[in-house]
Amino acid sequence: MQWIATCPHETVDVLASELHALGVQEQNKFYRGIMFDCDLETAYRAHLLLRTASRIQRVVAKFELSDLATLQTALKKIFWPNWLRNQRAFTVTPTLADLSAQKLDEAAIVTAVVQSVQKSAFEKAPPKFNPEADNPITIVLFIRDGSCVLGIDTAGRALHKRGWRTQGHPAVLKETLAASILMLAGYTGDEPLVEPMCGSGTIAIEAAYLALNKAPLIHRGKDDFSLEHLAGFDRPLWRRVGDQLRAQKKSALAAPIYASDIKSEFIEVARASALRARVEKYINFSVTPFQDLVPPAPRGVLVANLPYGERIGGGTIDQLYREVGGVIKQRFSAWRVALLVPSEAPIHLLALKATKEISLRNGALPVKLLMVER
Ligand SMILES: C[S@@+](CC[C@H](N)C(=O)[O-])C[C@H]1O[C@@H](n2cnc3c(N)ncnc32)[C@H](O)[C@@H]1O
């Protein structure tokens, strides 16, 4: 069985290492994703366990696609009742990924796929095409270099939507990006972690999941993943995989996690999310300005997502960056440090010698992960 996991291009290697840990050897990296082969059981584990994937697709067919006629010929070979069930509405999203693909008529591609589904010999009525339906099954076409990969999105809602987020912070990180940052920082749960500008707590909550070996999507409700609505869905196997992952969760942390912020209202948001994520008891929350931070252990990992914008509380960004750099140099000199900052930020004012700089994106914003490794 062939699958595709997608992610931001900058974190493809992190996703590759996650797949490797799942036992997936054969991987083919491409722009914003990885195509891989694995059996159904491993794929089910991947849906519940991958921390950095945005979406997952099952590959249905790969074929040459130069014009509408070649698409229609390829579609004739797909027996849709092997893939779709008729209870669930579906939609079609083509990605025309290069100039020659962009010469194709997108609406005609969608119509060709819809007609091919509706002409297939379903036992009852074929599934309905309805892009406006709640969480429809999505048939995805990725067209580039004169060829097409046609797949079905098996995740449904994007995988960063873990289900625990409480609203109330204006600048949250995506959960998948938070997990990528932790992995890039080499965090495994074996050392103390400090997150001193935690905002809504995304990094600390993801850290608790990682450290506890807890599957990030394990609390999604029944029927939430699209794969549960596809032909060939194996409910007993899906349940068994979920039970195995639940059993593999550790009951205690090997090292403590500390999360703080200068604003008490954000700590309340973070606490509420951690509670919904069922990891609140594993995180030591406090309202503490970075300037007052004291290392809770001789060594550990400090991960911070620094604020953007001109004015923070009473002071300026310049002043804050100088103070953050000073605290790290004076009090955290034995700690490994990873700071996520906007590329435009006054990074030089931190006056830290980064051992590595990794370019990432926080939504549309270019950011850098500055690492000080010890
Ligand atoms: C970009 S946000 C972090 C968002 C967080 N990663 C999330 O996913 O919600 C930066 C945070 O730094 C906090 N902050 C600003 N100045 C601070 C200071 N001097 N000490 C501690 N926290 C501070 C802000 O209150 C804000 O919540």
Image: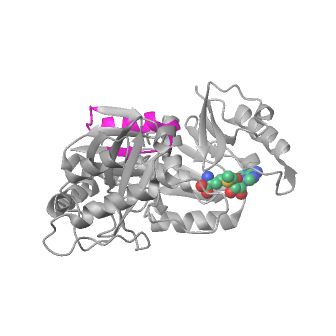
Q: Give left or right: position of 359 versus 27.
A: right
In this view of the protein, which residue sits in the foreground, 123 or 115? Answer: 115
Q: Can residue 181 be seen in this view?
A: yes
Whether 236 is among the magenta residues is no
Residue 21 located within the stretch drawn in magenta: yes
> Which residue is at the far front?
69
Q: Where is residue 249 in the image (x, y as percent from the top left)?
A: 31, 53
Taking the image as shown, residue 91 lies to the left or right of residue 247, namely right
Answer whether residue 198 is visible to the viewer in this image: no
Position of residue 335 relative to residue 211, above or below, is above
Residue at the image point whose x is 41% and y is 34% from the top: 145
Residue 356 x, y percent position in the rendering: 60, 26
In percent of the image, x 33 and y 58: which residue is there? Answer: 112
Which quarter of the frame holds ligand 1? Answer: bottom right
Highlighted range, magenta: 4-26
267 to the left or right of 251: right
Depth order, front residue of 51/126: 126
